[in-house]
Structures are given as C-alpha cells and as structure tokens.
Image: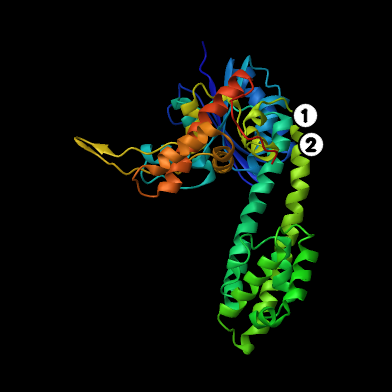
Amino acid sequence: MPSPLFVGIDVGSRDNVVCCLTREEANRPLSRFTIKNNRPGIMELKDRISKLIRKHGFEETLFGLEHTGCYSTHAAMYLQRHLDFGCPSTRVYMFNPSLIKEFKKSHYLDAPKNDRVDAWFIAAKLRAGHLPHPFTWSEPLMALQRLTRARFHLIKDLTRESNFLATNLFLKCSDYTLAFNNKLSATSLAVMEEFESAEAIAEMPLDQLIDFLVLHGKNRFDDPESVARTLKKAARSSYRLPESMADSVNLAMASSIRVIRTVQEQLKSLKKAIQDHLDTIPQTLHSVPGIGPIFASGILSEVDINQFQTHKELAKFGGLAWTENQSGKFTAKRTRLIRSGNRYLRYYLFEAANSVRVHDPVFAEYYAKKLAEPKEFAEKRALALTARKLTRLVFYLLKTNRLYEPKGVIRQNT
C-alpha cells in the first residue's frame, strides 16, 4: 500500500506555502509551492495535489493547517467539503500554532522561523501522528459562532471602558458607588452626565433629585427617596475636585458614556440575533436552570461534541483542567488552570456556571461547599470547580440529547 500524502500548509493573509511529504523520504519534500490565499489559489492547490495523487497512486491524503483565525477558515472549509482530489480518503486537521511551535522545538532547537520551514513541520506533524480530531464544520453553528464571539469581544470592550470610566468617576465623586450598585444603569449614566460635580448633586433640592431619578429610572425604583438621599450623602462625603480639572474629567466621562451606550445597544442587537439563530438549532442546554439563549449559544457554537469521547476531553478543550507538578516524592499542592484551551468556551462555561449556581440547588450546594474549604482564592476556585462540574453535565446533555429536569429549581430566561 503506498504511503499517505502529508500536506502541510502555512497559512498567511496573502499567500499559503505548501509542503508535501511521504513516509519514504525522511526530510526531502515530494513537492513545495506557494499559492495565493484566495479562491483561485485554493483551486490551484486542488490541481497540483490531484496530479500528485494520480502520479503516485496515493489512497490517503492528510492536510494540516495552523488555526490562524479568519485566514485559515476558508482554506479548511474548501479542503474539507468543496474540493474533490480523486483520493479515497481525505482528512483535514487544524493545529494550535503552539503545538507546531513545540513540535519544532522538540526536533530542532535552532530551527529557523520562516514560511517554508513552518509548512515542512506541519506536514511532519501529520506524519508523526498523535493527531487531533479531523476538522469538521457546520454552517449554522459557524454562523452562530460569529455572533457569540462578537458578543464576547463587545463584553470585553464594555468592561474595559467601564473600568476607565470608573477612574474618572472616582475623581468626580469618590463615594458615588454607595448610591448605585450598577454604575452602568441608564439612571446612573444620566446622573453622571447631568451633574457637573459632586457639589451640584449635594446642592440640588431633594424633591427635584427624586423627580430626576423617577424620570430616568422609568419609575422602577422601589424607594426613589431613599436612593436620592443616599446619592446626596455620597456627594457630600466625596472629595472635591479642583475646578481646573473638572472640565477635563467631565469631557472624558462623556466620551466613555457614549461608547458604553453604543456597546450596550449593539449587545441588545446581538442578543436578538443569537436568539433567532439558536431557535433553528436543536439543543437541550436551555433545560438547565440558569442557562438561557446566550450561554447556550456560546457553549454550543464552540463545541463539536463528536470530537470528544469523555467529559475530561471537553474540559481540557475549554481550559478547565489543572496542571500537575510532580517529581519523585514531591507533589505540588498548589496548581493552576492550564493556559491552553478555547478561551471563548471557557468564558461561556464560567459565566453559565455563575448563573446556574444561583438557580439550581444542586450546583448552589456544590459551590457553597467548595467556597467553605480553606483554600487560596476561594471564590475563583469554587467557581472554576463549579464550571468543571457543569462541563460534565454539558457533555452528557449534548451526547445524549436529553433534557435536564432537576427538582426544586428556579427557572430564569436570560
């Protein structure tokens, strides 16, 4: 039986460098060439590889690419589904770039870094074995993934901008957070914009301040008078900002507030789009109390459950596995989460776990038990372990396509 053909592709924004290896030639490539990273380029790749297959009679062809985000997506999809190479068996593998980097180090400590060498090592990794699950893709899930990842990035932008806003807010009114737990609420942002200084809040008549809060809070406060009094008290106890700085601080805050409101509006639009896409995809994650459309979509869009045989594999893929530090009789008591893994999946698992622990008594009890253990970073550790427990449930639900129906739970729809 002829050797399989191993095709390593180093993907770039403009060009893809291709290296073809066989088992017979240890180091010498069967073929090397460069193509454009576009549709004519991928069709040229098809013609060249098809000629090699016909000439040498290969019955199996393995393609390997580094996962370089958008630059490798089209190539992987075309190779996996749209191109026919006339070969009985064709498989496509997407490698974490860190894996290829470490594979290169394990063979040559001083190997040069260029596209031709990288393509050779990708093909050599295919030949060496220990490969991940072959690349597969689903158009509905990839469309959903674009939305959930966009939301992820907007959430990060919102967090960063709100933190920057908080630095200027402390200068303007240092005790402001005593009045509003959520400083990004519509009423809170309106207060920041309306009043130029802490003195303006403190000097405003109580009745007018109450009317202001009722108007901008759309009459949602249970006790607006109490909020108004707390706000005036916070303004009186805050530091006084020098007049020479007031205009600069207010202008910086106004800029941040505009950005925050824009991001909040975009998040609302994305939430609606995510819900609409999720309605077209059969799934059972929504049956878990605390997991609404957003968290279900975030998890579902990152997981091809057929790639995982156990919940441990899924947890490692999501970065919910702990490193081990052991040598001889020494075993480190303090370990950390691995740094590899899908950061989007890890984010949505943590967020979902934080919600599920509130709405499901089983997870609430487990979280409280881990929180009570005398360990460092108790809250982060307890949440990470709860997310790991949730991963087992997610694996079971996706594998069996069954509903989760515990007793004594509080349902929610966010």
Q: Is residue 238 visible?
A: no
> Residue 54's x, y, as percent?
64, 18
The foreground one among 39 and 35 is 39
The picture quadrant where one finds residue 32 is top right
Instruction: Please state which amino acid type lies under the numbered disc 2.
Output: Asp
Q: How is the image coloured?
A: rainbow
Residue type for callout 1: Thr
Q: Is the C terminus in the top left, top right, bottom left or bottom right quadrant?
A: top right
**Numbered circle sitting on residue 315:** none
Q: Are marks 1 and 2 in contact (CB under 8 Å)?
A: yes
Q: As rendered, which of 5 and 295 lies closer to the eye?
A: 295
Residue 333: x %, y % from top left: 29, 41
* Label number found at residue 276: 2
Q: Is residue 263 visible?
A: yes
Identify the secondary structure beneath mark 2: helix
Instruction: Determine which quarter of the picture holds residue 64.
Output: top right
The answer to whether 332 appears left or right of 145 in the picture is left
Nearer to me, 121 or 153: 153
Query: Which residue is denoted by mark 1 in the rendering?
Result: 280
Residue 42, image x and y in percent? 70, 34
Query: Helix, strand or loop at disc 1?
Result: loop
Residue at 59%, 67% in the rendered image: 177
Residue sitting at x 26%, y 37%: 326
Q: Give the residue drawn at x 65%, y 58%.
A: 158
Left or right, 293 with reference to 390? right
Q: Residue 75 falls in which quadrant of the image?
A: top right
